[in-house]
Amino acid sequence: MFVIGDIMKDITRRKFLIGGAFLAAGAVSGCFRKNPIYREAKETLNILGDGKIRFVRQHIGKSADTRKILFEGAEELKDAKVELKAENGEVTVSDAKYTPFTDDSAQRHLYEAEINGLKAGKSYEYRIVTASGESEWIKFHAPSKDKLTTLIFPDSQSADYSSWENVAQAAYANNSDADFFVNMGDLVDNGEDHTQWEAWFRALTGVEEHIPSAPILGNHECYDNKWEVRLPNAYLNYFPQPDNRSKEFPRYYYCYDLGECRFISLTTEWDEVNGFKKGLLDEEIEWFQNEAVKTDKKWKIVFMHRDVLQYRIKSRPERKEGISEAGEVFMPLFEKHNIDIVFTAHLHTYRNRGKIKNGKHGENAPYYILTGVAGDVRYPNLWTDHALDRVVAPQPETDNYLVMRIAGDTANIKCYRDDGALIDEAEIKRS
Ligand SMILES: [Fe+2]
Ligand SMILES: [Fe+2]
């Protein structure tokens, strides 16, 4: 299990952003113990009106005309609502559903309100209203029908989430027309540690209020404070994914439509989940074939955490190059169902493989991109290049993000370092 071992070597210290300022947590070597400075300051909330509300954010809906507004109260709020204002000044009101949960001994008072009827390409504003006050109006836009801009962030798991903050803020500042953003799993290093989730959300201040998030599950969301596997309790509570109609595994995998695209967000964490609930992979495959790929949208794009290829590791000569377990399961299905682009993560390196068919480069096949790293857990000199790699990010890698612009029959995908340097560009045409 290389992942934890390598990550633990990289841990040197933690910092947390509190109330807009960094407070150094001091040197914490090799462990994730709680930070007392952070705990004392946890009531430093983003005050909106005279209520204590923080982490106001948008979350992806099933289609372009709907999305969720999420926020968190310091305590249970009275009469929480979301007001939506259209360009003509018309205001509609949605009640916010109270969804409390407790994890890592921290109680959360989460609220979610669904807003509907958004018209393509139009501008809107929303605000949070409670019995004790209201927030400022927050601007956003609904995606247009004919072009779509997506920000894609690889693994952001970190010891110090300031590097995640830098890459997320740079991506949005340089692409303020973005319609939404995707996180490729391993959002946090430890899925139970509530201080990491708080640092992760804080890093998105100024971004997630304006564009919806569409995260996928990674293996690190399935670790508890003792680094043992558990169900991803915090992840499942924080992210109310579009309904997949599953009784056993709601929110684990899902799909949604924006513009001319069907996006399919898969889970590759069936090994982690199997010890608690059986049947995830079989159910997901059935859903993928019978529901997710059934669309008349022009583009079909997949996001999945674990990569489809297996790499040699310099220190482990017995490990062979080839196709990973996730690749063996899904690559034939991607070919069969004409998936256009597949984004993967987990290996903390950026690799563009081009189109792969039957385990070799080919035409009329899915285009595969391994997305890189967007946190401070990096694996310098770990992987030996794969024969299917066409572009590898300059080594050693720092943080990166991807911007995918789709218009008509063309998808343009650019990979940037967090300082704005262009690492790679791919143009994919629908045949
Ligand atoms: Fe990771
Ligand atoms: Fe991972």
Image (spheres, rainbow, N blue to C red):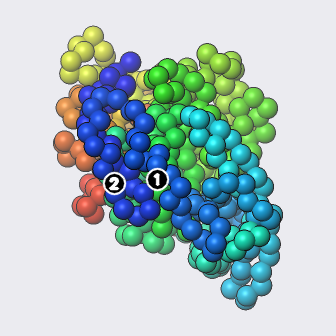
In front of the other: 404 or 45: 45
Which residue does the numbered mark 2 point to in the structure image? 23
Q: Residue at x 53, y 33 (%)?
A: 192
Q: Is residue 188 in sight in this rendering?
A: yes
Q: Position of residue 32 (x, y in %)?
A: 39, 32
Q: Residue furthest top?
A: 318
Q: Is residue 36 left or right of residue 29?
A: right
Question: Which of the two discs, 2 and 1, sits closer to the camera?
Answer: 1
Q: Tell me the distance, in whole angstroms, between the alpha carbons under discs 2 and 1.
A: 10 Å
In front of the other: 262 or 137: 137
Q: Does dot 2 land on a helix, a strand or a loop?
A: strand
Could you tell me if the residues under marks 2 and 1 are in contact, i.e. CB atoms within 8 Å? yes
Circle 1 residue: 41
Q: Quadrant of residue 55?
A: bottom right
Residue at screen point 68% across, 41% down: 101
Front one among 46 and 215: 46
Q: Is residue 178 above or below residue 386?
A: below
Q: Quadrant of residue 296?
A: bottom right
What SS does tag 1 mark? loop
Residue 46 in the image, given as x and y percentages of width and height = 53, 65
Label 1 crowd (10 A; few <14 / some 14-19 / many >=20): few
Residue at image point 80% right, 72% down = 93
- Type of amino acid at the residue the image marks with label 1: Ala
Q: Tag 2: residue type?
A: Leu
